[in-house]
Amino acid sequence: MPWLVLFVIVVYGIFDEWLQGYVAGRSCDVRDFFSDLAGALAGLILFSFLTFWPAGLVVMATFIFGITNVTRVDLADLLPVTNAVFHLFAYAILTVLWIQCMQIFPTVKEVTKAEWLLLVIAGPTSFLIIVKSFSVVAGKDLAPSDIIIAFGAIVAVVMIFYSRVLFRRIRD
């Protein structure tokens, strides 16, 4: 199956690059094809070692870190609304993936409700602190609104999951 996935990605990459030659302002570039191929290989390697939820968490964390710190474009200056939406959804998705990964480990199922809440909030919040600290070290502007939006997304997702668990226990 991995060979089929790799074949489909190679065919798609070739077709994508070929079609870009017909789009105004775009060009066919073999480096883009190899970037696509490298991403596909990295994904196949990642999914061969990790199950879905941990692999998704790694991909999402890498995506957030890359968009926030590695790209040359500053979303906050270019598109402020897009920047806010990015922080809202990226950290909400990261938190969902974190919660799903925590449910895999049997020791987490034995903690109290307060400990569970602390663990669930601590993971994504720690990642947020690391990403924003790296931004400062890299010389990027630190926008308090980004931190507030991201932390709000983390707390909202945790409250939704926690409410869902409580509702199920009341119903049962």
Image: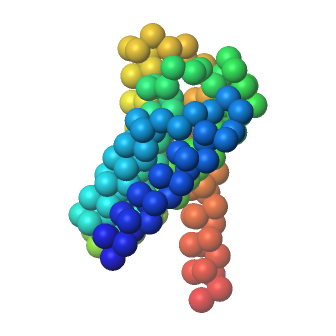
Q: Position of residue 154 (x, y in %)?
A: 56, 46
| 115 is higher (above) or lower (below) than 136 | below
What residue sits 31% from the left and 54% below the top? 41
What residue sits 57% from the left and 64% below the top? 162
What residue sits 44% from the left and 65% below the top? 8
Q: Position of residue 56 (x, y in %)?
A: 43, 58
Q: Position of residue 65 (x, y in %)?
A: 44, 34
111 vs 133, nearest the viewer: 133
Q: Position of residue 122 (x, y in %)?
A: 42, 45
Residue 90 location, quadrant: top right
- Specify whether residue 14 is in view: yes
Which residue, as the protein is rendered here, is positioned at the far top? 139
3 vs 14, nearest the viewer: 14
29 vs 115, nearest the viewer: 29
**In which quadrant will I find the N terminus?**
bottom left
| 170 is higher (above) or lower (below) than 76 | below
